[in-house]
Amino acid sequence: MSAAAAGLRGEHFLAGAAETEGGETFTAIDPHSGKAIGPSYAEATAAQVERACAAAAAAKLPLLATAPAQRAALLRRIADGLLELGDELLTCYCAETALPKGRAEAERGRTVGQLRLYADLVEAGSWVDARIDRADQQRQPMPKPDLRRMLVGIGPVVVFGASNFPLAYSVAGGDTASALAAGCPVIVKGHPAHPGTSELVGRVIHDAVRALGLPAGTFSLLHGRSHEVGTLLVQHPAIAAVGFTGSHRGGRALFDLAAARPEPIPVFAEMGSMNPVLILPRAMAARGAQIAAQLAASALLAGGQFCTSPGMVLWQRGAGDEAFVATLTEQLGGAAAAPTVHPSIKSGYDAAFAELGKLPVEVTARGAVGDGATAVCLTLLSASAAAVVANPRLRTEIYGPAVLTVGCGQRAELLQLAGSLHGHLTATVHGDGDDFAEFADVIEVLRSKVGRLLANGVPTGVEVCGAMVHGGPYPAATDARFSAVGPTAILRWARPVCWQDWPHELLPAELQDHNPLGIRRTIDGVVS
Ligand code: NAP
């Protein structure tokens, strides 16, 4: 990827101005060759962080005051701009991640779809959950006041994206789109693994903000490779909330920083997950090999670099499990994984195996080392239920193409193992006939640990729609009450405000009697 070909200039977008200045520099790395590619990016300085935060603070009220149609226009313009980048964006994405073009196209489609979804949502307007409880002067013993409430954007949001989703969970990803829809200025801390992709997308947002005459502080993108930029952003008093997608270590560090501020703020961190898969006896006996093939294909997707990748399989030993294990071993052991998206993912994967080497876990198959400087080996592991229950590390994500199998002796062991799991994004249950009824207790334990429960499928593939829950109990996420995907993700960036006995003509349009925006509201307890 030549810098000129990709139109890359090493730019931050700082509240309406593009600039290349900053501190130490870094470049993207080609995962195939391990060599530097693209232009240099300067680490944002403390002064640049300060300017971005001050501009976001200045944009807070003007952006909130924009009509929903203006924010919808911004989101649609960004979506169109991403498509207009055409192959330039796809080429840069593939060069920086070693992910194939088909994946880049699919992720771009999802990102564009998310932007348009939030545009439609904000334009329809009902997301503000307007509630009106009218006054009753005759009420005894005290008259009842007029109370009207709705959700209002929380203020400037800092967004951190993950390296494995350079579009859908990055600069114009779901966090940015939903925060802008809610009327919140956004500052993105670009992921250093894909600075070029970030720059191209950042320029699209920067241009859209200017073209629509929105406040300059509506959007900033700051590059950085050290943790300092992110730390300064999270600690800045102008920042009202943080959206994070990435590792448990990163999410937790930012969560702790936010909690330690003089004025704590919420951090919505979506982190790693093992996504346990439970195979029940009838399903195992009837189609163990078939389930293994399905699981292997899911675990191999994107070189195991999906947060929903199936990383742990549990079952009660019995009929069909030999065929299951044999097929899983054959399929995973016979494959070579693609390069990981960044050298840090490879080093994290290697470090995880160094830790596992000290634990009672057996490597039962290893795939061939794939091509590329950041290639890792697919690994199938096996441990006893007792070992997993006794060692928290065995119940924690190994990020990359690794699957841990745990065959349990007795049903009680299965229940104990399920009970020992921490929070995950998903759990999958394979069952036939009465399996689900007979193992209802184990399934209920799993349900209590996850955001999404699947039957007879694979956890990879996250549909973007209203019923989706992408999140889960800690440590899958820092707040299990919200989803990071789908229209409800906007709720993370808003808070309820109540107007009491307020002059009617001064109320927000959403709360005025004649409902000028035609939105769904709850009036005196009745949805209208
Ligand atoms: P990462 O290393 O945690 O990076 C994510 C972002 O957080 C980067 O911008 C990173 O900046 C920043 N960061 C990390 N630690 C920080 C700290 N201590 N202080 C300040 N900033 C910090 O994650 P990744 O390796 O890119 O992504 C892989 C992980 O993401 C996996 O665990 C995967 O399961 C998870 N993931 C989760 C989801 C989900 O929806 N739940 C989706 C995709 C991926 P620096 O690079 O500057 O450190």
Image (cartoon, rainbow, N blue to C red):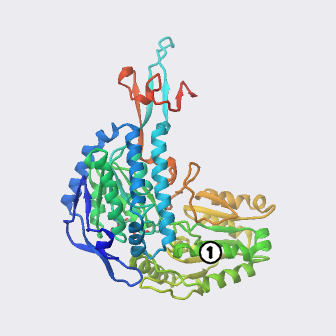
Q: Quick check: 185 above or below 388?
A: above
In this rendering, position of residue 180 left or right of residue 12: right
Give the camera-side residue of 418 and 220.
Answer: 220
In this rendering, position of residue 237 left or right of residue 409: left
Disc 1 residue lies near ligand 1 with CB under 8 A: no
Name the residue: 38% across, 43% down.
Answer: 71
Q: Position of residue 19 (x, y in %)?
A: 21, 62
Name the residue: 26% across, 68% down.
Answer: 10
Q: Quadrant of the C terminus?
A: top right
Give the camera-side residue of 335 and 403.
Answer: 335
Query: Farthest top residue?
Result: 138
Using the rendered view, name the quadrant where residue 282 is placed.
bottom right
Q: Position of residue 12 (x, y in %)?
A: 26, 62
Residue for badge 1: 297
Q: Position of residue 178 (x, y in %)?
A: 43, 49
In this rendering, position of residue 313 left or right of residue 160: right
Q: Residues within 10 Å of mark 1 (few under 14, many from 20)?
A: some
Q: Is residue 182 visible?
A: no
Q: Quick check: 405 above or below 161?
A: below
Ligand 1 placement by image quarter: bottom left
Q: Is residue 14 visible?
A: yes
Give the camera-side residue of 512 and 422.
Answer: 512
Give the camera-side residue of 317 and 21.
Answer: 21
Q: Position of residue 118 (x, y in %)?
A: 46, 47
Using the rendered view, name the quadrant where residue 414 is placed.
bottom right
User: What secondary structure is found at the residue carrying circle 1?
Assistant: helix
Q: Quadrant of the N terminus?
A: bottom left
Q: Quick check: 27 above or below 211?
A: below
Give the amino acid at mark 1. Answer: Ala
